[in-house]
Image (cartoon, rainbow, N blue to C red):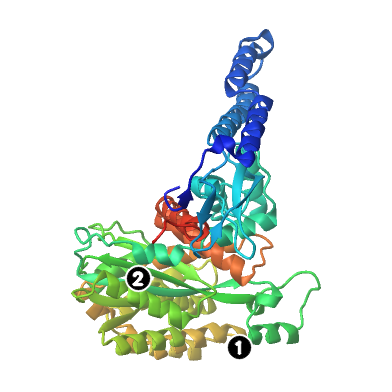
Amino acid sequence: MNNIRQNTTNPTKNPNIMKAQKNDVAQSIGIESAIEKFNEVQSNLRSPEYLDKTHSEVESYLATEGREMLRRMLQEHIVKRGDGWAGEAIEGADRQNRDCKRLGTRHYYSSFGKVYVKRLGYKQAGVTSVFPLDGAMNLPNNCYSHRLQKRAAKALSGNSIRNSSSDIYDETGVNIGNRQLEEIASEASLDFGSFYESRVIDKAIDKKPICVLSFDGKGIVMRKEHLTEQTKKNAESESHKLQKKLSKGEKKNRKRMATVTAIYSIDRNTRTPDEVAKQFQPIHVVKDKKPPKPVNKKVSASIETPMKTVIQKTFDEAIRRDPEQEQELVALVDGDHKQIDYIKKQAATLGISIIIIMDIIHVLEYVWKAARSFFAEDDRESEKWVGQKIEMILKGKTDAVIVDIFNKAVETKISKDKLRPIAKCLKYLSNHVEYLRYEQYLAKGYPIGTGIIEGTCRHLVRDRMELTGARWSVKGAESILKLRALRLNGDLDDYWAFHEKKEYERNHKTHARLKGS
């Protein structure tokens, strides 16, 4: 109530308030008390009938009746809060006086079930009504409590909408429809950017010599109307082998690319090419030492924001973390030429020196694609061959690898179809030689491959966005990506406290204020 200009009078003489009190008494009498409900449950549990039930039956009974008891406790608490009387009139943030009062009832769904709120609204023609009790309780604009919305956000970040709805019903007894869950996800992710911008970096644990920016891309299957114009045209012009199912290779014109990013600080990890090459050999080799752990890691993904803007924001975050630029900046990339161009241009614009490194995992994938053209799928020689080529690349002999693969392709009689992955591998290596100087990177202790961004693509994007039959809108995909990033970063609880404060500011704080504020 501190944010409202009050003009107090005796509420007992106000007809609206007297009516509100009468209604509150009637409502209180109409609700069986939580204590009575508790006694009822206790009595049942002691009865011969329930003493013969299984533990599952008893737990199921307690889950349902226990929620009802808690719902009644919450309802009675709301009644005891009154109707939000704030005086004969209040002044809104627009400095307009509101002296017309009307008592009404709204409801919302809590984690325990549906409850009702009788509250006084201060109105005036031509201006927005103000409900002081809504502000005091920080009630949401929709009909779902913030706690219930948080449960929904957690469920949606890891499961389909349909399964999330089912899980929420099982846990709370509240049935939330698919459309309402989509709206909750959209509203729940509103403060993602401002949350991370407001976070203070703990310099005590961030005294690391290297700051790593990692970028990757992952396609998400979209609803047709949410594809980019060019992809939509490609999809409309192509023919399909089957009528009701997309065959291999046909999904590429059903996707829109999400840009996945990670930023973290890390210690140097100096090692030799031979040490790293052992990890790619057929025989598993136990590492002699544990690699350094990243700190202040933040992963995120966006399908709505253009790649160029995502890269700019990631640079902004790096500068915010290290304004004096004491850390060496390293960018791990997947090989997308646009991505690399944007990184170079942004670094030049900011006057920042940055080392661009091709993620060794992507290099490995291309070499394996070539190997599958040369060797049978179950031929163990392919592992040995790939290990040898990666070792040569790690030692700075990429040019020699290109020649070796080309010569093997010439000498080996293979079909045109099998030549395509070989050609792609050769093109990939040739176009990115300047970012494959691993012998130099290893000597300086830079990371050359990251399970962080690969894991992000897998856990943040693929595991959630590629659920069977999923087709996304841009807005829906963006919301889920943000919620999933919060969960993977371990920040969902802190974010939600921040989000609820922002909700108060949006929905209540600006509606009414103290005189002169």
Kind of residue at badge 2: Gly
Q: Could you say which disc has been placed on residue 449 in the image?
A: 2
Q: Could you say which disc has been placed on residue 307 in the image?
A: none
Q: Residues within 10 Å of mark 1 (few under 14, many from 20)?
A: few
Q: Residue furthest right?
A: 243
Q: Can residue 433 be seen in the rendering of this structure?
A: no
User: Residue at label 1?
Assistant: 416
Q: Secondary structure at mark 2?
A: loop
Residue displayed at 43% across by 69% down: 383
Spatial CA distance of label 1 from label 2 is 32 Å
Left or right of residue 459, residue 325 in this image: left
Q: Identify whether 253 is placed above or below 294.
A: below
Q: Identify whether 416 is placed above or below 510.
A: below
Kind of residue at badge 1: Lys
Q: Identify whether 156 is placed above or below 68.
A: below
Instruction: Judge by depth and name the residue closer to the eye, 226 or 256.
Output: 226
Residue displayed at 65% across by 78% down: 227
| Quadrant of the drawing holding the C terminus | bottom left
Residue 226 % position (x, y): 66, 76
**Lower sequence index among marks 1 and 2:** 1
Left or right of residue 225, residue 311 in this image: left
* Res. 358 image quadrant: bottom left
Residue displayed at 44% across by 54% down: 501
Instruction: Judge by depth and name the residue closer to the eye, 426 or 178.
Output: 178
Instruction: Judge by depth and name the residue closer to the eye, 438 or 144.
Output: 144
Q: Can residue 415 be seen in the rendering of this structure?
A: yes
Instruction: Judge by depth and name the residue closer to the eye, 431 or 155.
Output: 155
Residue 329 % position (x, y): 26, 77
Residue displayed at 58% across by 83% down: 418
Q: Identify whether 372 is placed above or below 237.
A: above
Q: Secondary structure at mark 1?
A: helix
